[in-house]
Image (spheres, helix red, strand yellow):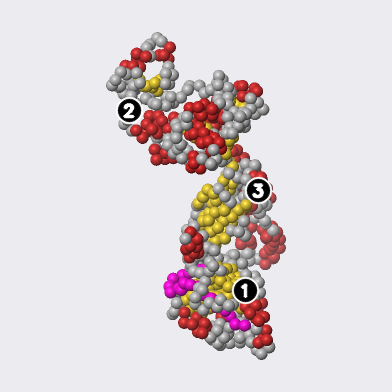
Amino acid sequence: MEGDGSDSPVTIKNIERELICPACKELFTHPLILPCQHSICHKCVKELLLTLDDSFNDVGSDNSNQSSPRLRLPSPSMDKIDRINRPGWKRNSLTPRTTIFPCPGCEHDVDLGERGINGLFRNFTLETIVERYRQAARAATAIMCDLCKPPPQESTKSCMDCSASYCNECFKIHHPWGTIKAQHEYVGPTTNFRPKILMCPEHETERINMYCELCRRPVCHLCKLGGSHANHRVTTMSSAYKTLKCNGERAKEEAITHFEKLFEILEERKSSVLKAIDSSKKLRLDKFQTQMEEYQGLLENNGLVGYAQEVLKETDQSCFVQTAKQLHLRIQKATESLKSFRPAAQTSFEDYVVNTSKQTELLGELSFFSSGIDVPEINEEQSKVYNNALINWHHPEKDKADSYVLEYRKISREDEMSWNEIEVCGTSKIIQDLENSSTYAFRVRAYKGSICSPCSREFILHTPPAPVFSFLFDEKCGYNNEHLLLNLKRDRVESRAGFNLLLAAERIQVGYYTSLDYIIGDTGITKGKHFWAFRVEPYSYLVKVGVASSDKLQEWLRSPRDAVSPRYEQDSGHDSGSEDAGFDSSQPFTLVTIGMKKFFIPKSPTSSNEPENRVLPMPTSIGIFLDYDKGKVSFYDMDHMKCLYERQVDCSHTLYPAFALMGSGGIQLEEPITAKYLEYQEDMQLKHLM
């Protein structure tokens, strides 16, 4: 029977937390369903309302300060419980008003209405599940007979009408054959007895027999006739039961119907295409038959060749000349007919090949669709990839979805990778553990209830060619705090050289020039492949970025204006005239020049050295890829993960990310350099707490 839990064993670990009251943190006891659809024990509702009443009546009391809706509270007195059960009770209220109750499950205030607790439904289904859980937890613990004289025997049946458990002998005594009790409904041993008929909490003498589709709750006929559900749409309880419990089967039937329609369309198109091919075939055969009949006479000329051979054997000159003219005319006519022969119809059916590529793509995107849910769109400007992929999308507020599903897959030439799915509550998600030097496709769809929108247009991102190298700006090695301003996080540096230049204006007249101010990363590289990224502020006058070895850095920091500085080296991007020498020689540093919203590519013997070909628009973000083992450094446009320039670099010493600024400028390391950035945040939080 329905109440017997022995046929459906309960998996304790899977459902345990669903059976715990959010207020007392124990298994539910007579749970009530709140308007927010969370459940809470009947006694906990009363205790919480009493606590709130006390806190409002005595604001300064210790009880009001220490009470919490998530703590189990002492049992209330009976007079207070009676006062709460009266309709219209509200804290600090003498007149019938609504009751505001703080739900411990969602931590929102819910309106219990004028009837308060009396207007709440008891969650009998949850009670049954809790009882099954208790039986599973007790395992071999038996339910004893309620009617046996001591010592009681183990019960074998529980009567739902009598709300009692019986052993075999007691059940026969209290439910004898031929009496009304013999017709009672009984189940296996249980301690959970619920009424066979649900009564309306607002009209206690009326049974529940309808379901309000607007409020999504059962009601009686008085609720519909003159109560709060008078203007609401209601349905029968059986119809609501089928809708709520069998909606999965109905959804399957509807899906099958849609697919059957598609099958019908495909069969119809298949039949139409095959008929068109057959019709064309018949028409062409008719034309060929007619042509065959027209040229049937040519077949009769097959004997003309043999006849001509016999004429050539004629030795009498007069006879041969007389016959030759006639033979020549016949041969000429037959030859002309053969030369003009063309098939009467096309022999190929290449124009009847069915192109299904577009339809195949559409069928591949087939999903549940509702016209009430707009398609979300991925925001390409705010979505980016670094060590992780950050995907942002937007969705119209009027059609805000309940949740989203973000799909992504690696695009591979070898095979078609399957989509990975992640359910997201917001409109952004960080995807981790992506493979380096790979291309990924992303798309998103919205869900509202059980209905989803079509997928958004696919968005393509390319991951960096190597793992992300984590570092921050070094504030110790050669850092000039008079010219450079470093933020507390050490992930951003700005040049203040413009102000110093004004102060030194008189020296400019005697040949003074501003110098590059250097700053490097606080971590060096001695092996492996590494990638890092940063942004150069658009207002920057001149910025150099790249890598430099530890020995070269010492030279620069000791004599920044010396001729060996990157101002005069071929990698600097300046047209010094000496850049053509030593292109293949590996340098202990490689820097490119960025400024005035431009990216300058150094001269190279393998590429065009025309100025217009060496000046590119400055990328939004710039990436640097260092392959220490191969001694190669590359510069990337992060927006498209495209390599702009690469060359060899001397890797005999430790290499550091190197930066130099002249004039006003700013460099911001990309935020996904998270390892040391998060360490800094933790340190700052500890300092703040101390």
Residue drawn at x 53%, y 41% is: 60
Which residue is label 1 attached to? 665
| Magenta extent | 514-532
Say what amino acid the circle numbered 1 marks. Gly
Distance from the alpha carbon under mark 1 to that under mark 2: 80 Å
User: Is residue 481 at least partly visible in the picture?
Assistant: yes
Which residue is label 2 attached to? 142
Q: Tell me which label, 1 or 2, sits earlier in the chain.
A: 2
Q: Secondary structure at mark 2?
A: loop
Q: Secondary structure at mark 3?
A: loop
Nearest the viewer among 526 and 511 is 511
Check disc 2: other Cα within 10 Å, few if <14, some if 14-19, many if 20+: some
Residue 396 disc label: 3
Are the residues flagged by discs 3 and 1 in contact, CB closer than 8 Å?
no
Distance from the alpha carbon under mark 3 to that under mark 1: 39 Å
Residue drawn at x 58%, y 58% is: 383
| Residue 680: percent from left, percent from top | 49, 64
Say what amino acid the circle numbered 3 marks. Pro
Distance from the alpha carbon under mark 2 to that under mark 3: 58 Å
Q: Tell me which label, 2 or 3, sits earlier in the chain.
A: 2
Nearest the viewer among 382 and 659 is 659
